């Protein structure tokens, strides 16, 4: 019963979100309290154009090594996924040190974050406690891993994880890298993003 209600509610929300514009909609500016990047959504047409560009980047990176080498810097990709600022990265760094020190000090996870800074050419910055520059997005993935461990009783070992909207698989890569890696990790996303995740992870 609860599952049917959830499916019905999700379908209603999607139908409302994807409805064609009947008249000019007012623009809505969304800004996180600490974000340095405003997101401007003016109508469904603009969103579909933006996501079409994102899909093009995913598709190209999945099949072309030259595009893969820099996909994390492509403006269309940054707009959707790879947009954690240096300052927000510092906040994730602080959360790791305070809330998830075991994650912060795990050598395998640190090596994974450093290696990810060399894949796709993301923006990287120097953070305290790191010997080299890392991507603030990777710091977010590490913090989320700490949160997942907390929800799962302190360990991911033996767990099956499904990530909806997993993008290029950065979170999956981190969750599979630790000493207590998830038993299984599935990324569900647009077909082009899933192809990119298979190449990335």
Image (cartoon, rainbow, N blue to C red):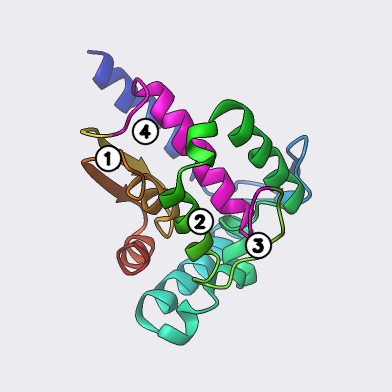
Image marks 3 and 4: residues in contact by CB distance under 8 Å: no
- Which contiguous range is marked in magenta? 129-156
Callout in the foreground (2, 4): 2
Within 10 Å of disc 2 (Cα), the crowding (few <14, some 14-19, many 20+) is: many
| 3D distance between C-alphas at marks 3 and 4 | 42 Å
Residue 31 versus residue 193 in the image, above or below: above
Within 10 Å of disc 4 (Cα), the crowding (few <14, some 14-19, many 20+) is: few
Q: Mark 3 points at which residue?
A: 133
Kindly indicate the quadrant of the structure image that contains residue 34.
top right
| Residue drawn 62% across the image and 62% down it | 78
Q: In the image, is residue 104 part of the stretch drawn in magenta?
A: no
Image marks 1 and 2: residues in contact by CB distance under 8 Å: no
Q: Where is residue 120 in the image (x, y as percent from the top left)?
A: 51, 72
Q: Which mark is residue 113?
A: 2
* Badge 3 element: loop
Sequence-earlier tag: 1 or 2: 2
Q: Residue 182 carries which label?
A: 1
| On-image quarter of the C terminus | bottom left
């Amino acid at each position: 019963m609860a599952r049917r209600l959830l499916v019905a509610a999700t379908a209603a929300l999607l139908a409302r979100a994807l409805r064609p514009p009947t008249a000019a909609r007012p623009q809505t500016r969304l800004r996180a309290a600490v974000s340095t990047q405003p997101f401007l959504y003016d109508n469904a047409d603009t969103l579909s154009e933006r996501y079409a560009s994102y899909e093009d980047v995913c598709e190209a990176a999945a099949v072309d090594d030259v595009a893969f080498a820099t996909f994390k810097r492509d403006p269309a990709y940054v707009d959707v996924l790879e947009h954690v600022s240096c300052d927000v990265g510092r906040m994730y760094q602080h959360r790791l040190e305070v809330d998830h020190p075991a994650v912060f000090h795990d050598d395998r996870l640190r090596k994974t974050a450093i290696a990810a800074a060399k894949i796709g050419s993301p923006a990287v910055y120097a953070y305290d406690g790191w010997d080299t520059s890392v991507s603030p997005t990777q710091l977010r993935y590490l913090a989320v891993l700490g949160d997942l461990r907390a929800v799962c009783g302190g360990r991911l070992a033996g767990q099956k994880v499904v990530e909806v909207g997993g993008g290029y698989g950065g979170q999956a890569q981190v969750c599979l890298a630790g000493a207590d890696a998830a038993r299984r990790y599935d990324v569900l996303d647009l077909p082009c993003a899933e192809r990119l995740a298979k190449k990335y992870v």
